[in-house]
Image (cartoon, grey):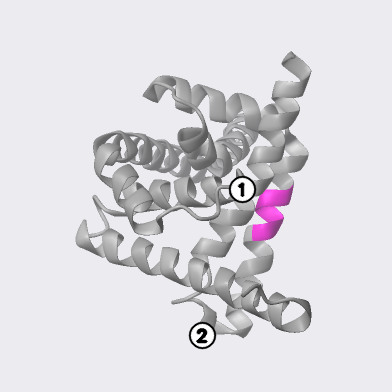
């Protein structure tokens, strides 16, 4: 029997909450199973893959099977993409600290240049998971496309960054959300915003 009215809305809300809690549970378990070092990136991509299915109106997917399939099949590629970005991040951090400690106009210019590149890198990070799960691309193409899409859709990137900051402040006031409803919600919003960017690009190229 289908519920309508207030009870129907409450049932749907509770159903979605349970889905987000379950996906976050899987993300946590599989991240820990890979000792974080090897499990974090596959778990994150698997979580984005599930949220992408929901955004594409495929809301009745078997969550565990979908999550496990991506985790297992993309284990090595996700780690390669993830650790490449971590390495790039360390390089930027090193040069920002290095140029900041030196005096002279030349080093000030180099610091500003490194800072600008760092902003682009951070924009790339916002899109890397949505691009990975949405398109069938080689590793180098994933890195290239995420940067291109981020630069082509700066307001979408800003919206994603604002979402992350806003949710950070929310969980700082309600820390009890962290184990149950944090990364899964953020992943869903990121994927939704990224999907709008993908549709915009597809419409432009049509």
Locate residue 85, reporting x and y percent. Answer: 41, 38
Residue 191 position (above or below residue 29)? above
The magenta stretch is 159-163
Residue 162 marker:
none
Local crowd at mark 1 within 10 Å, few (<14), some, or many (≥20)? some
Quadrant holding the N terminus: bottom right
Left or right? Give the position of 177 relative to 148: left
Locate residue 157, reporting x and y percent. Answer: 68, 42
Q: Nearer the viewer, residue 104 or 86?
A: 86
- Dominant secondary-structure state across the stretch colored magenta: helix
Residue 87 position (above or below residue 63)? above
Q: Is residue 39 visible?
A: yes
Residue 4 position (above or below residue 116)? below
Left or right? Give the position of 22 relative to 117: left
Tag 2 residue:
176
> Which of the two discs, 2 and 1, sits closer to the camera?
1
Locate residue 138, reporting x and y percent. Answer: 39, 21
Q: Nearer the viewer, residue 92 or 148?
A: 148
């Amino acid at each position: 029997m289908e519920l309508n009215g207030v009870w129907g809305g409450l049932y749907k809300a509770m159903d979605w909450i349970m889905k987000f809690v379950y996906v976050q549970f899987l993300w946590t378990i599989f991240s820990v199973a890979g000792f974080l070092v090897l499990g974090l990136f596959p778990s994150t991509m698997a979580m984005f893959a599930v949220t992408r299915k929901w955004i594409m109106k495929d809301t009745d997917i078997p969550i565990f099977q979908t999550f496990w399939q991506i985790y297992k099949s993309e284990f090595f590629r996700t780690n390669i993409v993830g650790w490449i970005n971590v390495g790039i991040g360390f390089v930027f951090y090193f040069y920002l600290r290095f140029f900041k400690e030196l005096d002279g106009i030349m080093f000030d210019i180099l610091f500003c240049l490194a800072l600008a590149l760092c902003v682009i890198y951070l924009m790339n990070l916002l899109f890397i998971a949505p691009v990975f799960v949405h398109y069938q691309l080689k590793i180098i193409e994933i890195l290239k496309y995420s940067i291109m899409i981020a630069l082509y859709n700066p307001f979408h990137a800003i919206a994603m960054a604002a979402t992350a900051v806003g949710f950070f402040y929310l969980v700082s006031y309600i820390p009890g959300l962290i184990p149950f409803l944090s990364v899964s919600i953020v992943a869903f919003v990121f994927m939704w915003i990224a999907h709008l960017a993908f549709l915009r690009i597809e419409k432009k190229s049509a």
